[in-house]
Structures are given as C-alpha cells and as structure tokens.
Image: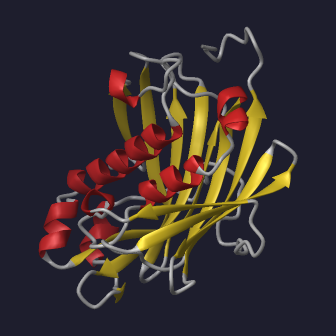
Amino acid sequence: MIKNYFDKQFELRYFEMNKCGMATSTTILILLEETAADHCYSINHSLYQLGAQNVGWVLISGVLQMERYPNYKEKITIRTWLSKYSTVKGFRENIIYDEQNNIIGSARGLWVFFDIEKRRPAKIFDSIKEKWAFCSKESMDYNISKKIKAIENPDVELKFKVNKFDTDMNKHVNNIRYLQWVIESVPDEIIDNYYLYSIDGRFISEAHYGQTIISLIKNHTENTSFMHTIKIKGTNKVCATAKTVWKKIERGHKKFKIC
C-alpha cells in the first residue's frame, strides 16, 4: 500500500543555528526544500533527472508558520504530501514535528512544473502523478493564492547584487535567497527581541545573475508585521512580495533561548 505522505528526519547542525543556538527561518525553508527534493527522488524523478529533461519545479506562492524553532542537535521530522493537482501545478503541504511528535511548524506551497528552456509552465508528467499518492487534507487553513500588493512608499530600501551562488538549477534566483533579503531589511530591534512567526510570499517574476535587487519594507502593524517587496533596480520590475508576522520573545520562556 502506498503511503499518502513522505517523512524525512533531520538533526539540526551548528551552522544552521543563530547566535542563540536556534534554527533560523532560512534553515527551515532549506529543510523543507530538501524534503521535497527527497520526495521527488523517492519516485525516481529527482530534480537532476528532471533537469536533464529541461523541466523542474518552481515555487510561486507559499506560507511558513512556526510555533517555535528547533534547537542545536534537536531532531525533527518533516512530513510532506500533495493535496491538490492541476495540469501544471500542485499544492505541497508540510508539517514539522519535534521528537515528542508535537507540531512546531507548518507550511504550504504552490509549485508549478516548469520548462527551463522555454521559461513557461509545462504539463506534469503522468508518471509523477501516478507515483505521488496524495491526500486532500491541508496542513494549515491559509489561502496562498491571494495577491499581496507591492509597496509604494517603503520605510527602508536595501540593495543587493545577485551573485552566482544566489541562483539555482532553474537558472534564476532561488526563493530562499528572497527570504534572506527580506530578513536583512527588518530592523535590528525586531530581530533581537522578536521571532519570525510567519512569512507569506508571492513570487512574481524572475531575477538573474548580475542584476541588482532592491528590498523594500514597510511597517504594517507596529512591531508585529511588515510588508515587503523585492524589485529589480532600473526596471522597477517586482520579483516578489511578502508579509512577515513577528512575535515578542518572552524572556525565560522555555521554548526560546535568549542570548
């Protein structure tokens, strides 16, 4: 009998931690992508096999919500499955468990099957649909298809050059790099005293090696949420929009290590 989900375990490593010994939000996104990649590999459609056929998966919208971040050497399990398919795209669900099987996070992503050479959506292979059993249950009740408007009057703007290591095998900037650019624009006072509870993002157009990125941020509600926009300098083209929600770290709370 085919399971309708795929599990992968991780033990958190030193270089994946922040200065307090807790996993970063970037680390969590990397582990989610690694789980999805292993899910592809498990059905003999690894990302490298797909890449050899000039196709791959591209994230167009997604949300991550964390009740807490795992600590150094803590073991977690990420469970992933597909909840819905269309001809060219599918919804990937994720739940993150700690060692006691408590849910510490969840995520949803809308992925498009992509023709790398033609730079447009492609029909999902029948063999993928046949081997990937799915479950209609959703990991969280959250609409990731709703548009997030671009910022027009930002509070802060930061510029970044797109380097070679910012791009992936699909020949564009990886979505994890966008999160890093978003976090860089958040005030230090928030970074030091709050934790990223959720990020909801939309990926609108591609950015490539050599371009200059502008990360814009606007305070949405005082010290609890921010709106973000990533643009390409010179063209004003919007690459991504996002909303982050931050929660105050309670001093002495057992879930969080305070430096």
Q: Residue at x 49, y 21 (%)?
A: 19
**Whole-percent x, y for residue 64 in the image:** 59, 48
Q: Nearer the viewer, residue 128 or 231?
A: 231
Q: Farthest bottom residue?
A: 118
* Colouring used for the render: secondary structure
Q: Residue at x 33, y 46 (%)?
A: 34
Q: Is residue 148 left or right of residue 79?
A: right
Q: Kindly indicate the quadrant of the structure image that contains residue 257.
A: top right
**Whole-percent x, y for residue 54 in the image:** 19, 79
Residue 13 in sight: no
Q: Is residue 85 left or right of residue 259?
A: left
Which quarter of the figure is the C terminus placed in?
A: top right
Q: Residue at x 64, y 51 (%)?
A: 199
Residue 92 in sight: yes
Compared to residue 105, the image places residue 116 above or below, namely: below
Compared to residue 68, the image places residue 64 above or below, namely: below
Compared to residue 103, the image places residue 2 above or below, namely: below
Q: Nearer the viewer, residue 246 or 97?
A: 246
Q: Residue at x 57, y 84 (%)?
A: 236
**Whole-percent x, y for residue 35 in the image:** 35, 45
Q: Kindly indicate the quadrant of the structure image that contains residue 103.
A: top right
**Whole-percent x, y for residue 137 in the image:** 60, 54
